[in-house]
């Protein structure tokens, strides 16, 4: 490949070094930012604690009497049932007769029978 008296070109590899950049100012700034954020968070926590301390306290500590509530519910259910029974009796006690035969008319399930 080489001609007469020529030698192949020689490449000299130059060692490349990355430029040295001083990152310490950036790290210091980030440290300051983190410090300020932590101080703000602590201050917010103190404000929240103060708000919680000034919140109104419950004035009544009511314990639920389940027996009494059960009895009241039972009374309401029985009153509703008794009212329905009274309405049915009132409708069923109405005597319906046939004018032709004089006998009671056989009623089917309807409003008249209360069913």
Image (cartoon, rainbow, N blue to C red):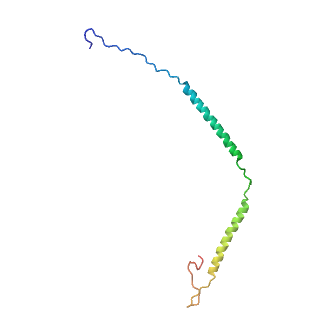
Residue nearest the viewer, comparing 18 with 61 = 18
Q: Which quarter of the rendered picture does the N terminus lie within?
A: top left
Above or below for 66 versus 91: above
Above or below for 96 versus 62: below
Q: Quadrant of residue 5?
A: top left
Residue shown at 66% from the left, 71% from the top: 80
Q: Quadrant of residue 97?
A: bottom right
Residue shown at 64% from the left, 79% from the top: 89
**Is residue 32 found left or right of 54 in the rendered image?**
left
Q: Position of residue 58 (x, y in %)?
A: 72, 52
Above or below for 78 versus 112: above
**Is residue 74 found left or right of 12 in the rendered image?**
right
Q: Position of residue 98 (x, y in %)?
A: 57, 88
Residue nearest the viewer, comparing 7 with 72 = 7
Q: Which quarter of the rendered picture does the C terminus lie within?
A: bottom right
Q: Quadrant of residue 53?
A: top right
The residue positioned farthest toward the top in the image shown: 5
Counting labels gives 0
Residue nearest the viewer, comparing 94 with 48 = 48
Q: Position of residue 93 (x, y in %)?
A: 64, 82
Residue nearest the viewer, comparing 67 with 30 = 30
**Is residue 17 found left or right of 31 in the rendered image?**
left
Residue shown at 65% from the left, 38% from the top: 43
Q: Position of residue 68 (x, y in %)?
A: 73, 62
């Amino acid at each position: 490949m080489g001609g007469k008296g020529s030698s192949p070109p020689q490449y000299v590899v130059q060692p490349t070094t990355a430029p040295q950049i001083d990152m310490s100012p950036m790290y210091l700034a980030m440290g300051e930012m983190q410090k300020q954020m932590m101080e703000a968070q602590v201050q917010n926590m103190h404000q929240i604690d103060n708000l919680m301390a000034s919140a109104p306290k419950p004035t009544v500590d009511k314990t639920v009497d389940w027996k009494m509530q059960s009895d009241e519910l039972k009374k309401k259910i029985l009153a509703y049932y008794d009212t329905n029974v009274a309405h049915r009796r009132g409708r069923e006690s109405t005597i319906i007769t046939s004018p032709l035969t004089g006998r009671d008319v056989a009623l089917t399930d309807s409003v008249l029978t209360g069913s």
